[in-house]
Amino acid sequence: MSSYIFILLGAVLVNNVVLVRILGLCPFMGVSKKLETALGMGAATTFVLTLGCGTSFVIDHWLLIPNQLEYLRTLSFIVTIAAIVQLTELVIQKTSPVLHQVLGIYLPLITTNCAVLGIPLLNIALRHNFMESLLFGFGSSVGFSLALVLFAGLRERLEGAEIPLYFRGNPIALITGGLMSLAFMGFAGLDKFK
Amino acid sequence: MNIAFNSPYFRKPASVRSVMLRVLLALLPGIAAYVWFFGAAILVQIALASAAALAGEAAILRLRDKPVWLFVSDGSALVTGWLIALSFPPIAPWWMVVVATLIAVVIVKHLYGGLGQNPFNPAMAAFCIMIVAYPQLMSQWPAAGHHGDFAAQMQLIFGGGERQLDAVTMATALDTLRTALHSADSHATVHGVTSSQPTFGMFGGNGWEWVAAAYLLGGVWLVQQGIITWHIPVAFLAALAAAAGLAHGIAPDRFAGPLFHLFSGGAMLGAFFIATDPVSGATTPRGKLIYAAGIALLAWIIRTWGAYPDGIAFATLLMNICAPLIDLNTQPPVFGHKNDKKP
Amino acid sequence: MALGAIILGAALGYASIKFKVEGDPLVEKIDAILPQTQCGQCGFPGCKPYAEAIAKGEADINCCPPGGEEGIRKLADLLGREFKPLSEEHGVEKPKSVAFIDEQTCIGCTLCIQACPVDAILGAAKQMHTIVAKRCTGCELCLEPCPVDCIAMVPIPETVENWKWKYPVHPIKQVTA
Amino acid sequence: MIEENSGAPTPRPPNVFRISTSTALVLLLFTLAFTALMAATYQFTKDKIEANALEAKMELIGTVLPPSYYDNDLLKDSIELPPTPALGTEVPSHVYRARKNGEPAALVLEAVAPDGYSGHIDLLIAVKADGRLAAVRVTNHHETPGLGDYIDPKKDKNKAKPWIGQFDNVGFEEVKPEEFHVRKDGGKFDAHAGATISARAVTNAVGRALKFAVDNQERLFEEHHDERREGRHEERKEH
Amino acid sequence: MNALRKLFRFNGGVKPSYNKEPSTTEPIVDFLDVAGMPAEYVIPLHQSIGGVPHPLVAPGEHVKKGQLIGGPDGFVSSAVHASTSGLVKAVEHRLMPHTSGLTALCVVIEPDGKDEWIEHAPVPWRSMAPDEVRDALRDAGVVGLGGAVFPSYLKVNPGKKGALDTLVINGAECEPFITCDDMQMRQYGETIVRGAGILRDLTKAGQVLIGVEDNKPEAIAAMNAALKATGEQRIEIVPVPTRYPAGGAKQLIRVLTGIEVPHGKRSTDYGVQCFNTGTAYGIYEALELGRPLISRVVTVAGNVERPRNYIVRFGTPMKDLMNVAGAKPDSDRVIMGGPMMGFAMPSADVPVVKATNCVLVGSPALFPPPPPEMPCIRCGECAKVCPTDLQPFEMYWFSRAKIFGKAQEYHLFDCIECGCCAYVCPSRIPLVDYYRFAKSEIWARENEKAAADQARTRYEFRMQREEREKQEKAAKLAAKAAETKAKLAAAGAAAPEDDAKKALIAAAMARAQQADKAAEAAPAAEAAQPQAPQE
Amino acid sequence: MGIYREITWNSLWKQNPGLVQLLGMCPLLAMSNSIVNAAGLGLATVFVMGMSNYAVALLRSFIPYEIRIPVFILIIAALVTVVDFAMNAWLHDLYLVLGIFIPLIVTNCIVLARVEAFAAKNAAVASALDGAMMGLGLTLVLVTLGAIRELIGQGTLLSGIDMVFPSAKPLQILSPDYPGFLVAILPPGAFFVLGMLIAGRNWIEARKARAARVEKPAPAAV
Ligand SMILES: Cc1cc2nc3c(=O)[nH]c(=O)nc-3n(C[C@H](O)[C@H](O)[C@H](O)COP(=O)(O)O)c2cc1C
Ligand SMILES: Cc1cc2nc3c(=O)[nH]c(=O)nc-3n(C[C@H](O)[C@H](O)[C@H](O)COP(=O)(O)O)c2cc1C
Ligand SMILES: Cc1cc2nc3c(=O)[nH]c(=O)nc-3n(C[C@H](O)[C@H](O)[C@H](O)COP(=O)(O)O)c2cc1C
Ligand SMILES: Cc1cc2nc3c(=O)[nH]c(=O)nc-3n(C[C@H](O)[C@H](O)[C@H](O)CO)c2cc1C
Ligand code: SF4
Ligand code: SF4
Ligand code: SF4
Ligand code: SF4
Ligand code: FES
């Protein structure tokens, strides 16, 4: 039980996907200009990534490893995730138009978030079992959403600052990301009793 | 007719400079206690930090084509410099404080537009950068009562080459406690450690407890002066005491008590001088409570389980990140809208 | 793998047809930002066509002079693109003006009435025409058709009612200057 | 899981169905073509990759035990130990048995120091048949870079005489078991000032492992080779 | 009785130095008695909130004192009257008492010196319908004299319930330097109380509370005496703690009744309404004497030798007041209103208007230019003193960066521009200027947006109409063509041929035009395409 | 000639993926802690991008519009897998260091972005060049970042070169006493240095623009 908590804690804070593992930076930089979009992106990613981790575990352990098809891992994972994204879109469009309106535009963007492939691959590398994979996926995407939303909050405020000309836009955003990453280093060690 | 400025036509005589100067003034009791227990080296560090802060500020203002004197004389860079000096080990090599201050002023403050616009606490960001880069140099602290060894301290600060440490340094109370409790095959208890090691004082770190008490004094004066409100220090200290007290109550052998936590490390400095940085912190009354309590809780967690002996700096940065969202969600009700439902 | 491919392909083929013809709410949002001057300076026959072109990614966001920088900024915000200064080939931002007909010269040819996209010009054949200043968007489309050049653009005058408080001067700059 | 979703019947007009099948077919063709490409590459590189893995393992063992000490195939002659408190292991670990001319020459053990500054420190320890250590290496750790990471000779500033070299050729004859600690704890081993914790963790773990190896030497050499040792431990890496 | 009343408090507020004594040493006098008639009265038509009244007189006309010269225009507007009898010299644009330094339409009257009233009679308001009373007040030009110059007839309204709980008469006068209400209460307390009584009856108020800041003990005493003398019922004089801006309508209502009227809501919906003491006086004069509003009490203070209050006719140049009061030579500015909220005048030549409660003369020594503005350090001082509980620094942060949407999210439009925040700001930021700037930009934008929306509908309407007309025309022509063809066929070649031809041509043209239109759009789209792949 | 030069200039500077488009950030930041890592991953990306652009440009007439994205991903994933195996086989040490960032080239947005924006519309050779040059643009930024971070972080250049050329030695640039500014090698350093690089590019562009304006005064009024 406590190992699950540490996995979750580790994924959300200590080894935050974006700030420590450095995955998923394109959406981190791209969809963080407004709080609202950041929230939408976070929610959509959380959904897809958690589902993706579960499915990729199943595929890896029931399909690829028994048939010695490990060399198809990258391909099958990315295709699976693309499929999940598409199906999710279909399903929520049918079941909940409201949700579709909120998340719809972010879903297609998710496939180019390298965390959705990176985290399932890390699951394999870290030899997580099914439950751990799910938790790791969920924790990572919550970590992603957390970083994204906090970053968006900061950026909304920064919009009003008199940032030196050459640093406006992406440079200052990156430096802010760096300071966030620095702050998250403070969590180092909290997961070591694993 | 002169209509270059509009109403109100007269103002209260207040200025950023007087605010900052009073913050510096409030630090003096703490500095005095610091010198008393740990020698005059800290004064050298403060001088170094001040020089670096003013020079860095002047240079970057010049580059940015901003009025140099107006901003250099506002005193905010001095506050940043002093706080860096006070949070670094007083026997750290001279270049560390200088580099840290320059990072704080040039990168963390001015790349965001300078005074009032930086979302991160410059002093604490610089501290975090330096402790990540130089953990060893950042954890060499002098032992209390060595204030006679000014020459030795100067040798450590300015002398290059191998540092002869064992004579003057000593792990801090927080570090010692942490080390002892984390060791795999030790059966150390809090009481056992604190009562046997010279680094512990009556209720905090030896010597440090009195420095902290002096900071408390200066901080209370700041509250009285109206420069800071009670929200942040009270929430900070209460949350730290509550977390420590709860854990100590459950497992007194594994967790130090509230008094120890309040009076060691950077807690007091943090509560009154660091968490209260108006620029990078939360600003609404409720927001301030959440913000300060957040710093205290994170700092306690990092102290207790994390990799760093003290967590005030990291906790401050972490809550800096949260501050805009805290503010956004704790806006006080506007006149006439007190009974409105939250959207 | 093959099975997966088949299913995926089927699903995608299905979805692609299913969702091909869906109204684009983005166009409405873009159109709401455009100033509705309908002047065609953007190179499209009106604001809505320009909005459609932007939504399709066929036109840049910086082609509308009447919308000015403010408009470009809003578009950039809406579409998550970077702000760009107004494209020079499409014209420059001018002070807001309205058309004014010199009633002495007007011969009542009604050509301007036909040109005005917002029906701001009143008059009947062979009678002097006037422009309802409140309705005029300042698109200048009526200037060209007029055979006697009696229409001129006059900037909207500043009055106590429409006067705006200026951006507070930054005395910091004054000190260094 | 895909099957589940496609099972849900959705009313489709017939032309949709036709287009769906044709796209599915094209996709299938592409999939087959590129899967073939991957399979070919896999076949082509498979042997080399496996050889690499073995080589890497041997190279690692080589850092603690030079090949001159033995003439058997270490990877073949290994056993798997259950989690052993004396080695600090919480998962099964390997012991490689070096023999020369059929005589026991040395044991190579995997051990863990659980109390590093930031968590576990993984160790590879070679113990010669005479009860002396051949060498010790840190295979994985999270100690603070620039401070505690000198326990890894690659990061040790003192390249000529790395800290971990202290354990070379040391046995309980040279250092008594109760002295197998860092100097600060009354032992015989040095530690870098300001970073004793890492050194303490490694030293204590080496001491415990050495004792375990000496006490169980005979049993370890005799046990039968375990065929189920395919678990590729070195793959477990933190990024 | 006073001691029993429970007062409430509003958050924030400041206590600047009041400087009220100098102008209270001498009683109010009529300005005409000390200075005589000016050479001309310049009476702006736009003196109150709302529509600009239209001029009712032409140059060369003779007018009498109190004659209507500007008729109210629209639902929110108030009449303007001649301040004295004389000749209308001009109806032209003159410099306005407005910070912009812009001109607006004014009626310029050259006094004939007779100061002859137009015929007027008391209004029998007790026997009139409420709407008629309101019309009378509108035609008498009574507007709020507390500063907002909102037409009073709109506020004389018992509200939805048909009766107000509380009518507040605002005698707080919290702005430094200004003493016109104070002195008016001391000298004309009875009139004010009677005016309050009229307002009480018109709004059917359960009680009338006259709030006076407790730094005006003489006024409080005079009002209590007047209350006794008039014998008015359900009226009470309530001293309120002195703290700027206790005189803000919302703040005073809060202090006296505990009710908070939010921005954008009518106070009558909460059962309260607030009038200035001067307005009460004006209402008494308008209804009981039938006199329209042509003068008011004005404080002249600041950098002058003899600060004092005068009854001043509208249209009198401010310079005349300054001369009489003895403006000192180092004077550099004229402010209409007080130092916290007043507006700098573009010139001393501008006339006194209904909004002029004070002519405040400034000098560099009295109102020194503020030290350089520093960036906001988010110290929160401004939030502490804001009487509307706003976060001024957030509004400033986004106003400065011209991110107006965000500024509005922080309730920019709840700001009453009281200036407390700028008063305490250690960075000496002209905060209120930023709010005024942001507000006027937002208004301008809203107007533009409304204009654009209107243009869109007009454009769409036109497109539809054109389409319809085209179709109708085509159909008509086709029908006509068919008809002529039939006729032709029937009547042989008797009918002239060109009619049918014309019809055919027109129909073809219509078709071609439609095709043209479709073709026009296509190339435009194509032209844009090749650029796309290259980015 | 003209078009190839334009493609090159566009990819390396004007639309540089690392400095301007800010795509493919993860490998850029994560693997730029030393020159060798940076160059290794960068070259792998060059290969994948060049090949995938080439392949897509060749095959594009067979790909139905609706499933183009899945097919593109399929092609990219296959190529990445090929690189993955190749590096595992012949650059094993480097492969271990780069870890999951090789398979992650699949999701590197810049790869798909170029395939979609360029290869799907242009000729095969130009597409291959575009892909390779975009990859090279990313690699240049990666290597620059790597060099700066390595130098500030530990005072060396080309550390770990022995993973590629076993006999080569890293260069010690700063004095061995240089204390090493560790933050530069850690994740925060990656953000900081890239931020500074982009600011530097902005500065160069602004200077160029200013120079251009001085040289070429605005066209005279007609
Ligand atoms: C940020 C930080 C990281 C540290 N990392 C290590 C480490 O990895 N290994 C270690 O032994 N000590 C580390 N320390 C130092 C320990 O806290 C402790 O001071 C030291 O190990 C005690 O050694 P000494 O007894 O030689 O002074 C670190 C300290 C700090 C502040
Ligand atoms: C900050 C502020 C201060 C005010 N101070 C006074 C005041 O002292 N006396 C007053 O009568 N009106 C004052 N007003 C105007 C009142 O808000 C309100 O408009 C007036 O009392 C309504 O009465 P009226 O319509 O009769 O003018 C102030 C307004 C504001 C915004
Ligand atoms: C068309 C219109 C009708 C109004 N009617 C009322 C009303 O019935 N009751 C009322 O209290 N205020 C009424 N108002 C006044 C507004 O609420 C006004 O903002 C406020 O009373 C002026 O506040 P002051 O007291 O600061 O001058 C009306 C305003 C307008 C524009
Ligand atoms: C009460 C108070 C506390 C402050 N604390 C800090 C601090 O912790 N760190 C710092 O760099 N500056 C501090 N400053 C100075 C200044 O606000 C800070 O440098 C700003 O962040 C500069 O924009 C403080 C100032 C005040 C008034
Ligand atoms: S230039 Fe602007 S205003 Fe004119 S038609 Fe185009 S979009 Fe409309
Ligand atoms: S009147 Fe002229 S300028 Fe005004 S909208 Fe009509 S066509 Fe355009
Ligand atoms: S008082 Fe001035 S400096 Fe302080 S928060 Fe308000 S605006 Fe900022
Ligand atoms: S001017 Fe506006 S923001 Fe400032 S204190 Fe007054 S009400 Fe508050
Ligand atoms: S490369 Fe990681 S999200 Fe784009």
Image (cartoon, rainbow, N blue to C red):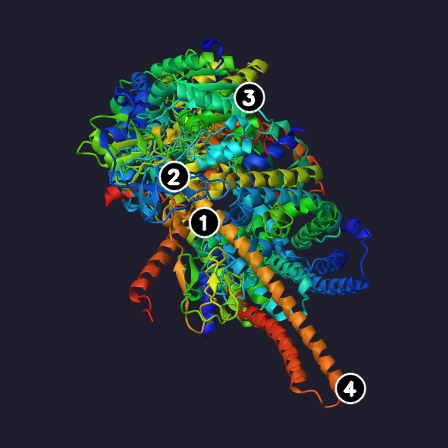
Q: Are marks 2 and 3 on the same chain?
A: yes
Is E116 positioned to the left or the right of E122 in the image?
A: left
| Structural distance between the alpha carbons of marks 3 and 4 | 87 Å
CB within 8 Å, label 1 to label 3: no
The image's mark for residue E490 is 4
What chain does mark 2 sit on?
E
Q: Position of residue F75 (x, y in %)?
A: 64, 62
Q: Amino acid at mark 4?
A: Ala
Residue pointed to by mark 3: E165
User: Residue at position x 54%, y 54% from top?
Assistant: E454
- Residue found at the very far front of the displayed protein: E119
Q: Helix or strand or loop: what does disc 2 sit on?
A: loop
Instruction: Reply above or below: F130 against F176.
Output: below
Q: Helix or strand or loop: what does disc 3 sit on?
A: loop
Of D116 and D221, nearer the camera is D116
Where ligand 1 lies, by image quadrant?
A: top left
Q: Are marks 4 and 2 on the same chain?
A: yes
